[in-house]
Image (cartoon, rainbow, N blue to C red):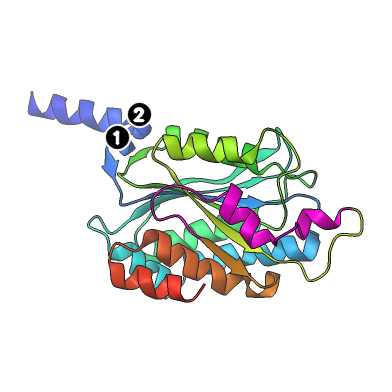
Amino acid sequence: MLRLIAATVAALLVIFPALVRAQEPVDLLLVLAADVSRSVDANKFQLQRNGYAAAITSPRVLEAIKSGPHGRIGITFVEWSGVGNQKVIVDWTAIGDMASAQDFSAHIVESQRPFADRTSISSGIDFAMAQLEHAPFSATRRTIDVSGDGTNNSGREVTSARDDAVGKGVTVNGLVILSETPLSWNADHTHPPGGLANYYRNNVAGGPGSFVMVAENFESFGQAIINKLVAEIAATPALRTRALAKR
């Protein structure tokens, strides 16, 4: 009888892995949502991809992950552009050590660019929310990490998407990537009145402990995303405070 029970359990683990994973607790569910709209040229796109890939394997980020009670987080990487143009680049993964971080990182850099059209931050947030609803892990904290270089110019109002997410207990943080020169075809997109950082603070970020960090250019994106990930992931106030002080 015991052998039969053991064989049945083993078969279920093979046939229904998602059901088993759904019971796995993690300290944080994190959606990395990256802008790949047409204002992000090929060089900027590659710098952004490489920045995320390097950040997730940073010793500082891994230290923050291990600071939690479970010592691991659930994370997925998506890219977004205009309405209807969102894609999961790396599906939900549990990261708790260097090996799992490196595997996640490798999948980021090897995928092809999916889109390059308008900028629908609202659709990106909505898509990220859909991923959170179907995450195969459980966590008390849920965060959407939005990075971008321009304002919402497609889809519904970004504040509506942000408010819907916050209303469901999700924190939305922003990483603003400043452009050195305005776009010739739409200067206000990357350089809105009051600055893009303030735009993100007023329209994108929301929820308990939400914040916006700024990368002065795409070259500094890598360090900015490390600081942002540490602040989002850290379970100890000291780690979070140090990361936020560097924004």
Residue 200 counted in the magenta span: yes
At 25% from the left and 55% from the top, the residue drawn is 70
Residue 106 counted in the magenta span: no
Q: Which mark is residue 177?
A: none
Residue bearing the label numbered 2: 16
Q: CA distance from mark 1 to mark 2?
A: 7 Å
Q: Quadrant of residue 18?
A: top left
Please name the amino acid that badge 1 sits on: Val
Residue bearing the label numbered 1: 20
- Residue 225 image position (x, y, % from top left): 54, 66
Circle 1 SS class: helix
User: Would residue 134 be seen by someone viewing this image from the given angle?
Assistant: no
Q: Is residue 141 above or below residue 167?
A: below
Q: Quadrant of the N terminus?
A: top left
Considering every residue shown, the one lying at the far left of the view is 1
Please name the amino acid that badge 2 sits on: Phe
At 38% from the left and 68% from the top, the residue drawn is 62
User: Would residue 38 be seen by someone viewing this image from the given angle?
Assistant: yes
Q: Which residues are magenta?
A: 186-211
At 58% from the left and 60% from the top, the residue drawn is 175
At 66% from the left and 39% from the top, the residue drawn is 86
Q: Which sits in the foreground, 213 or 69? A: 213
From the viewer's perspective, tell me whether residue 86 is left or right of residue 225: right
How many neighbours does mark 1 have within 10 angstroms: few (below 14), some (14-19), or many (20 or more)? few
Q: Which sits in the foreground, 192 or 40? A: 192
Q: Is residue 181 above or below residue 113?
A: below
Q: Is residue 165 above or below residue 180?
A: above
Q: Quadrant of residue 125?
A: top right
- Residue 242 image position (x, y, % from top left): 39, 75
How many neighbours does mark 2 have within 10 angstroms: few (below 14), some (14-19), or many (20 or more)? few
* Marks 1 and 2 in Cβ contact (< 8 Å): yes
